[in-house]
Amino acid sequence: MRYLVLTASFLLLAVLAGCATLSKSQCQTGDWQSVGEADGRAGHSTARFSEHNEACSKHGISVDRSLYNKGHAAGLKFYCTPNNAAKVGLAGRSYNGVCTGEMGISFLRIYREANDVHSIDKDIESLQNQIETLTEKLAQPDITQADRDDIVSDIRFLNYDVSRKMRDRAREDAELRQVLLEEQNRLSRL
């Protein structure tokens, strides 16, 4: 029993150590501007600073907030672009509301359109997986004709749904391209 408790304690410590945002060597290097820039480029909010500070304080190292913030602002210039908004949305990644002003308005508008496309892509993928599963069932030799007919009917309906979703995707993709163009033009006039 004691061995089990000791093992569980070591596993818990390993998991907790894995949660740190920076390693001891990264904290010792102390290139806070680069850390901030990397976080900005990744779309992290400045709240991440607290996580870094906590990770480094465990090693007796403090984080330079002003250098971090300077780097973070520089990183956001790369993150908060119309094309990146589309990329983030299409990938289904979350947006932390880090872009401000007119760039923030554009980013959010493009991101939402791109995320709509991503959502439809996930629906299509799910439908295609269902079709694949049913098709595999059709290949089983012990299936009755009544079951086979039901499966074929289900596949037919699923294929119809895929076709409908593909039309929705084409429409959403066109809307995304339109919004992206509108926002790029709007921002270029500012």
Image (spheres, grey):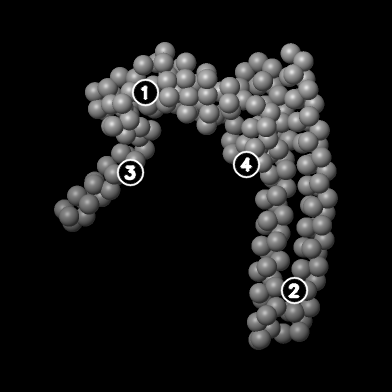
Pointer 3 residue: 15
Q: Residue at x 24, y 23 (%)?
A: 60
Residues marked 1 and 4 touching at CB (< 8 Å): no
Could you tell me how far apart the alpha carbons at marks 2 and 3 are, in whole angstroms?
46 Å
Looking at marks 1 and 4 on the same chain, the residue that comes earlier in the sequence is marked by 1
Judge from the rendering whether residue 188 lies leftward or rightward of residue 92; answer left or right: right
Residues marked 2 and 3 touching at CB (< 8 Å): no
Q: Residue at x 76, y 68 (%)?
A: 155
Pointer 1 residue: 31
Looking at marks 2 and 3 on the same chain, the residue that comes earlier in the sequence is marked by 3
Query: Residue 42, relative to residue 158: is it above or below?
Result: above
Looking at marks 4 and 3 on the same chain, the residue that comes earlier in the sequence is marked by 3
Looking at marks 2 and 1 on the same chain, the residue that comes earlier in the sequence is marked by 1
Looking at marks 4 and 2 on the same chain, the residue that comes earlier in the sequence is marked by 4
Could you tell me how far apart the alpha carbons at marks 2 and 1 are, in whole angstroms?
60 Å
Q: Amino acid at mark 1?
A: Asp
Viewer can see residue 104: yes
Residue situated in front as seen by the camera: 189 or 110: 189
Pointer 4 residue: 92
Pointer 2 residue: 151
Could you tell me how far apart the alpha carbons at marks 1 and 4 are, in whole angstroms?
31 Å
Residue 2, x across and y down, in percent: 16, 53
Residue 19, x across and y down, in percent: 36, 38
Describe the element under mark 3 as helix, strand or loop: helix
Could you tell me how far apart the alpha carbons at marks 4 and 3 are, in whole angstroms?
27 Å
Residues marked 2 and 1 touching at CB (< 8 Å): no
Q: Can you tell which quarter of the image residue 12 is in?
A: top left
Residue situated in front as seen by the camera: 186 or 46: 186
